[in-house]
Image (cartoon, rainbow, N blue to C red):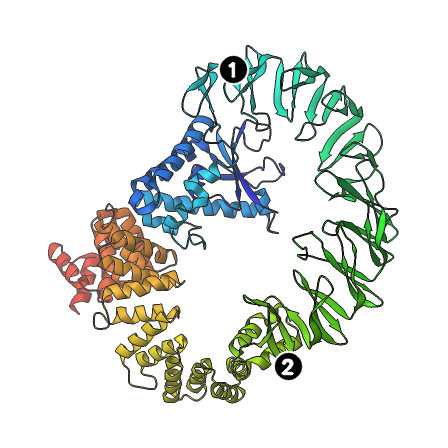
Amino acid sequence: MSHRMYLYNKAEIGSSADACLPLMEWGYELPLLLQPLFAQAPFVGRNCYNDPGSEEGLYAEAPGGIAALRAFYDFIERHAGQLLTDVEAFREARRKIFQLLDEQAGHAWFHLDAWDVFNMSDEDRRAQAEALLDEIERANACIREAIANDNPLLLDACPGVDAPWAAGSFRTLLNLANYDYGWAPLGSLLPHRDEDEPQIFCENELFGLRGANGQVLIAPRYQAFYEFDWDSGLACVQQGGRFGYVDRQGREVIACQFEDAYDFSGAHALIAEGGKFGLIDRQGQVTVPCQFDGGEPLDHDGTCWSVQQGEIWGVIDPAGNWLLPAQYRQIQAHGSCYAAKPEKGPQQLFTRRFHALGAIGLDKVDIAYLDEAHNAYVIRRRDGKQWLYRALDELGQPLLPGEYQSLKYQHDLQAWLVRDQRLYGLYRHSDRQWLLPCAHARLVPQENTSREDDGTSYCTVQDERGWGLYRGGARPGWVVEPRFERLEHLNQRYFNACLEGRWGILDTGGEWLRQPFDQARAEYRFVRDGELALVFHDGRTWALQSDGECLPLAAERALETVDRYAQFGLDDMQQACLQASAGDLWQALDCHRRGLAAYEAGDYATARPLLLRAVELGNDDALNDLGCLLQNADQDDRGALAYFHRASDAGSALAARNLGYCYQHGQGAEADLVKARDYFLLATERGHRPAHLELAALLLDHQPELGDLDLTLEHYLAAWRHGDKDESASCLGWLYEQREDYAQAQRYYLHASARGDAYADWRLGRLHLHGLGMPANPHKALEYLRSASERECENAYLDLAELLLDEEATQEEGLSWLQKAVDAEVAGARELAEQLLKQRNGAGLLGRLLGRLRQ
């Protein structure tokens, strides 16, 4: 089931009967590009369409939302070079978005209906709606912040940008093809329109039609002009209070002569005259006079119509012939059957040809699609503790001679799979005969066994004799009668067959491809080009080639197969044969795994011999783990270092990282920061992601002797990409500050600040204070500097003090922060205090501060 969110432009809150423009039907989300539509006074209110008594609908004022969206798109276009990969496509999407909103979205509210998505969770829908609204408000706050600072990089902090398909980049998200810069979701509920589709236009409150080339096909003269329906290619129009139809070429094919008219369904349309309803064909000829009180098509093809006489309904065909007499309160279509509620008594069901199925519930009927032209109706009833099933055709006639415990039509077999008295059979209704009587313990249709030449399909069948292979389709019959202990599908044309405890391969013609002498069933899932299957014989694994030759499976491939795929249904014998073919490679891997598990459990006595044995058998990964064991169990740093070197020489990324750590901290050898840097770098080159952060921190702490700022930045960015965002953010901000790239610095500082980083608050305060990369904003600066100081970032004390001392109303607080800066020995704090003392007398707090300075 697909779960969707729906966006509407509505005239009223909580109403399903108001004027409404459907805009969006989109999977699981309100895309970030459209969230500014909910920027103006958003709130959670009544659901309009699914459960009007509950409150999980989102609303916002539409005019303000459109203005916010326009400001957002203006901002994106101003930074097109930085944000857009296809400027012209963006401009076209923007044109269509605001043409739609400006010309059609004239109602007061935007309404987001996420009821369908909320129902995926057991959490209260109101709580989910409030959480979604909170996320939208946070996104809009980020958007406003980016616009205010004229910094598109701040959009990376929007909720949703960290999704896998965006990879933390708003630019990536913005340019995803499936969004079409916002037009794809926003216009998803609008009628589809081809590029060559003529356009309805309005002048002086009259409607006309303009071709795709701009040529006027119909001058504005209609009071109403509805969309063209895709079935007939005609559009309903109104002129002088009467209705008719025009085509896409601008011709009035049916004159405006009816009191009311509706879209065509198939070859006919409903019309009204004198308050009564009838039908016309596509030439405008009346096929059913206007005599009914109501009417509507029951299917898309217009082959049957429900019509109303007084308070009751019946069904007619397009010629006016009665298919169901007018004696029902309600008639509804449900797939390929119809439900009719009479004035008295229970609901009645009918086939699509209006033959009675009886007074049964819709939940008691399943539709079986026999072919393109025919359906069957499988009806169940309770019989004691069991259900019984019967099948009827579209005329209401039985397709099978009785009722059964289960019925399922098998298209490939061209027969019904029947269960009766707990036994299975096959019945073909076309010639009313049993292909297989209900005398079999199991009957399993086999998928993907059809031959391309004749479409034949197969099923495996079990009775007291064993398993056999039966052919269905046009030429039904036994391929091999039951005699096998087991019979399982291998691939399209072959089956695994077990006879006297040994396995062979049987083709769909009943011939042996491989005689039964294998220890386990053949395996098809892991074959390579030119191979039919893996087979298991003499305790080993072999690759069966297309020409029938068997080649021993290479040890490396056997190890890969058993290691990677054992969890996917390999039985014990298959695994044993694969392990034997892998030889010492498997023994080494097994010892390593058991040794590692013991080590991680703290059982060093068990782990040591297993890891040593794994090393002896050639498992290089065990070298690193032996080093960790020596380091943690024996505190033998020198011995651990030797194993780390052996593991690194064998290509281990983790061992290279461990060597970097040892040389950085002098464990097992003299500290050597150059070696530490080189081994951390080697670990990153081998794909060890956490080493990026350790290398970057080492480089930053030892500038410039170990590397320049560019190399440091490179590895902090790699750490950020690989998930160490919180640990990298402040350092990235500082590095970009050194480059005077203040927009990037602000982006990373904001990430760190949101997670309580006082240093980042200090740096953001200075950026706002001095107008670096943005207009100077003392109020923002004060906010960030106060936050940093209250979190005891000592460097912020002096900046906060200076800012507060500039205003007479805050000088007292400024002096208190200056005193803290002096106490913390912040550079420049004492000098500022002494400068102030020269300008003022020594009374009050300033005097007491002076006293402290002179001590």
CA separation, marks 1 and 2?
Answer: 86 Å
Q: Is residue 557 left or right of residue 817?
A: right
Q: Earlier in the sequence, mark 1 or mark 2?
A: 1
What is the x, y in percent for residue 596? 51, 81
In this rendering, which labeled residue sits more in front, label 1 or label 2? 2
- The part of the image, by quadrant, that contains residue 234 is top right
Kind of residue at badge 1: Gln
* Amino acid type, mark 2: Gly
Around disc 2, counting alpha carbons within 10 Å, would you say few (fewer than 14), some (14 to 19), or many (20 or more)? some
Q: Is residue 104 left or right of residue 362?
A: left
Q: Secondary structure at mark 1?
A: loop
Query: What x and y, as percent, mark residue 197?
Result: 48, 27
Report crowding for label 1: few under 14, some 14 to 19, many 20 or more residues within 10 A (C-alpha).
some
Q: Residue at x 19, y 64 (%)?
A: 827
Farthest residue toward the front?
Answer: 547
Query: Which structural element holds mark 2?
Result: loop
Residue nearer the viewer, 57 or 531: 531
> Image point 28% across, 85% down: which residue?
670
Kindly identify which numbered label has been placed on residue 350: none
Residue 140 lies, with reference to residue 758, above or below; the image says above
Q: Position of residue 765 (x, y in %)?
A: 27, 53
Q: Quadrant of the C terminus?
A: bottom left
Q: Is residue 753 above or below residue 75?
A: below
Taking the view exactly as shown, the residue that stands out farthest to the left is 838
> Dot 1 corresponds to which residue?
223
**Residue occupying the point 65% across, 53% down:** 452
User: Is residue 113 at all visible to an observer of this figure?
Assistant: no
The front one of 516 and 208 is 516
Q: Which mark is residue 539?
A: 2
